[in-house]
Image: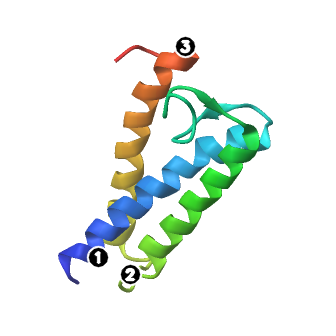
Amino acid sequence: MPWYHYLSYFFGGAFLANSIPHIGNGISGRPFQSPFAKPPGQGLSSSTVNVLWGFLNLVVAYLLILQVGQFSLHNFGHVAVVGVGMLAISISMSRHFGQFHGGLQP
C-alpha cells in the first residue's frame, strides 16, 4: 500500500477525534472553542456551530479513512495508524483546551 494512504488514515483519525468534543459539547448545549470563535481556538462558539463543525470533521474523517485506499478494520496496521492520529490530536487538544477548562497547564 502506498505511504500516502497511511498519511490519509493518520489525519482521518485526527479529524475523527476532533469531532468528539465539538459534537459532545454542542449536543449538550454548551458553548466550546472552535476556529470560528473570536479569538479563534480560544473564544467560545455556540453549541450549534460546534455541532456543525463536529459533523464537518466527521465527513472529512470519513473521506480520509474510507475513501482512500482499501481501509479495513481487520488490518491492524490500518487501525493502528488511525489510532495514532486520534491519540496525537487528543493529547494536543487536551493540553490546549486544558488551559480553558481546568486541566493541566502545558
**Mark 1 lies on residue:** 5
Between disc 3 and disc 2, whose residue precedes? 2
Which quarter of the figure has residue 85? bottom left
Residue drawn at x 33%, y 61% is: 10
Instruction: Examine the rendered structure and indicate whether residue 21 appears above or below residue 101.
Output: below
Q: Which residue is mark 3?
A: 102
Q: Please identify the quadrant where the N terminus is shown.
A: bottom left
Q: Mark 1 and mark 3 in contact? Answer it, CB < 8 Å.
A: no
Q: Residue furthest front?
A: 38
Give the answer, above or below, for where 44 lies relative to 47: above
Above/below status of 29 relative to 58:
above
Q: Which residue is mark 2?
A: 68
Residue 73 seen in the figure? no
Name the image colouring: rainbow
Which of these two is toward me, 71 or 46?
Answer: 46
Q: From mark 1 to mark 3, how far is it between C-alphas?
A: 37 Å
What residue sits 78% from the left and 44% below the top?
A: 27
Of 42 and 100, the residue lying toward us: 42
Q: Amino acid at mark 2?
A: Val
